[in-house]
Amino acid sequence: MSDAEPIVLRPGQMGALNRSYGPKPRDAARQVCFTRAELNTILNVYGRMVAAGEWRDYAIDMDRDKAVFSVFRRSSEIPLYRIEKDPKLARRQGAFSVLTPTGLILKRGQDLARVIAVLDKRLRVVES
């Protein structure tokens, strides 16, 4: 092919030029995500713990299998806790679970508010 020859595009080749990169709309529908209400519940607890000075950073990971909200004391460390949503476990033990850095499951269930209540350390009156 010389410089003088024109470039001829055939109909089958046009699709290769117009290819967009990133997730396809079909794949995005299969991705597991937290709903707005679930994120609101998680961020309420997160805000209280940040105000108390115990947590400083978070990360959200969404995959085909599960969605994970990780909580960090410092952003350079491993997460203190992971709040996971796994729809495959919804009919068994519950879709939501709270895990420690070692993988120990603190609580699992259907209701997110009850599951993350494990992390919310509120002050209690102790009688002597």
Image (tube, rainbow, N blue to C red):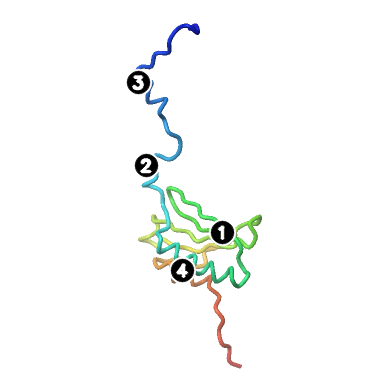
Residue 12's tag is 3
Residue 11 sits in which quadrant?
top left
Residue at horizontal 41 percent and vertical 61 percent from the top: 36
The residue mark sitting in front, 2 or 4, is: 2
Q: Residues under labels 2 and 3: Cα distance? A: 22 Å
Residue at horizontal 39 percent and vertical 56 percent from the top: 87
Residue at horizontal 51 percent and vertical 58 percent from the top: 69
Amino acid of disc 2: Pro
* Residue that badge 2 annotates: 25
Q: Are marks 2 and 3 in contact (CB under 8 Å)?
A: no
Query: If you read the primary sequence from the N terminus, does the residue marked by circle 2 or circle 1 appear first?
Result: 2
Q: Residues under labels 3 and 4: Cα distance? A: 53 Å
* Residue that badge 4 annotates: 115
- SS at mark 1 in the image: strand
- SS at mark 4 in the image: helix
Query: If you read the primary sequence from the N terminus, does the residue marked by circle 2 or circle 4 appear first?
Result: 2
The residue mark sitting in front, 3 or 4, is: 3
